[in-house]
Amino acid sequence: GQNIDQPTEMTATEGAIVQINCTYQTSGFNGLFWYQQHAGEAPTFLSYNVLDGLEEKGRFSSFLSRSKGYSYLLLKELQMKDSASYLCAVRDLRGYNKLIFGAGTRLAVHP
Amino acid sequence: ETGVTQSPTHLIKTRGQQVTLRCSSQSGHNTVSWYQQALGQGPQFIFQYYREEENGRGNFPPRFSGLQFPNYSSELNVNALELDDSALYLCASSLQGRETGELFFGEGSRLTVL
């Protein structure tokens, strides 16, 4: 079976750091993605990991451990505009570009 | 470069009707996927088209069908609409062969079935 788990909601303070965890169990693995989705808008690509380790991109970093089926998205220096849903998605091993998404984590950033 | 555009943005249908949703891919992208996103859930893969052929399908019944045109634009058709079909339908384009192959999503078409 295929299962992706992430917390439903998180809150954090402006300027702080927050870590959003994602665990997955899939029949195949060909990369893990994080997307940001503001209410009523399209998901936008944040990061991609296919090998173990940390990928850093400005205020956002993403970590992957394939042996543990675990990833996290780290957001530093939080801003109010970071309030959004964060979607963890695993790409299926089969040839086509199918992503299996978690339900998303709603992050609320407070002043 | 132009992004992914979808139409219509909102529509209301009744049970049993049929609906067609449209998508224009991002410039230069040759692959289009469709996803269904229910309220409070992550997107669920419906199917993917590459070179005008369906080359992957999720767990959706045959009344969900699609087309991809030579200019890589696409349609999603849903027949015999049911109440549970109410959702945001997202189109995503990507470039086959690109290392990350990330999907670029449109704003979606919000379908309400009454």
Image: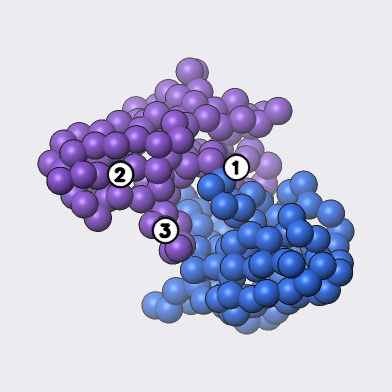
What whole-number distance in Å separates the C-alpha atoms at marks 3 and 2? Answer: 12 Å
Nearer the camera: disc 3 or disc 1: 3
* A76 horizontally vs B38: left or right: left
Q: Nearer the viewer, residue B40 or A98?
A: B40
Looking at the image, can residue A25 be seen? Answer: yes
Q: Amino acid at mark 3?
A: Ala
How many residues crowd around disc 2 within 10 Å: few (fewer than 14), some, or many (20 or more)?
Answer: some
Q: Colour of chain A?
A: purple
Res. B99 mark: none
Residue at x 59%, y 68% (from the top left corner): B110
In percent of width and height, residue A40 lies at: 45, 63
Residues marked 1 and 2, same chain: yes
* A69 horizontally vs A45: left or right: right
Residues marked 3 and 2, same chain: yes
Q: Colour of chain B?
A: blue
Q: Secondary structure at mark 1?
A: strand
- Classify residue B47 by image quadrant: bottom right
Residue at x 36%, y 50% (from the top left corner): A84
In the image, residue A48 above or below residue A67: below
In the image, residue B113 above or below residue A26: below
Q: Secondary structure at mark 2?
A: strand
Res. A108 mark: 2
Count the numbered circles shown. 3
The residue indicated by pointer 3 is A39
